[in-house]
Image (spheres, grey):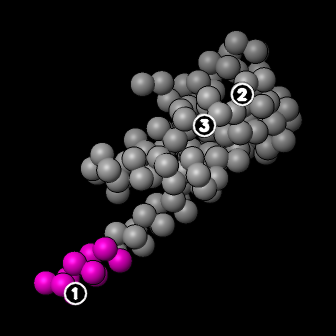
Amino acid sequence: MELFTEWLRQQMRDHHLNCRTLARRSGLAANKVRLAVEQRVVPSAFAVRRLAEGCGVEPASVMQLAAEQVAATTPDAKTPLEREFVRLLYLMSGVEVRVVTREMETMVSVRKARVSDTA
């Protein structure tokens, strides 16, 4: 499976871009681009769209790669259903990964509370 980060690095090589140039083209801070390239963070859905546009690529095709990377790198998403939930939430929400993770933790806590109440 190709990750968003791999795609981004390949685009930068193909178009002879550095982080600063891509940041200027996409309207993002150079530091955000660098962190995404180094795979320290998965950028927000908004940033992914801007990076795709900065590379001259249709954002919809790239969003799927980023969503897959988010699902694969979310530590709390252990089951396939949890990973799918995270992936879809990322695609629909446009928020950063830490917000997605917090949302998932809240939903899991609510579900656990309901299960313990019925037991």
Residue type of the residue flagged with mark 1: Asp
Report crowding for label 1: few under 14, some 14 to 19, many 20 or more residues within 10 A (C-alpha).
few
Give the main secondary structure of the magenta stretch: helix
Sequence order check, earlier mark of 3 and 1: 3
Q: Nearer the viewer, residue 84 or 52?
A: 84
Q: Residue at x 43, y 45 (%)?
A: 71
Residue type of the residue flagged with mark 3: Met
Range covered by the magenta-colored residues: 110-119
Q: x%, y% of residue 68? A: 47, 38
Q: x%, y% of residue 79? A: 27, 50
Q: Residue at x 34, y 69 (%)?
A: 108
Report crowding for label 3: few under 14, some 14 to 19, many 20 or more residues within 10 A (C-alpha).
many
Q: x%, y% of residue 77? A: 34, 53
Magenta-colored stretch includes residue 112 = yes
Kind of element beneath mark 2: loop
The Cα atoms of the two marked residues, 2 and 3, are separated by 9 Å
Magenta-colored stretch includes residue 29 = no
Kind of element beneath mark 3: helix
Q: Which residue is mark 1?
A: 117
Sequence order check, earlier mark of 2 and 3: 2
Q: Which residue is mark 2?
A: 58
Q: Which residue is mark 3?
A: 63
Quadrant in which the N terminus is drawn: top left
Relative placement, left or right, of 73 versus 35 is: left
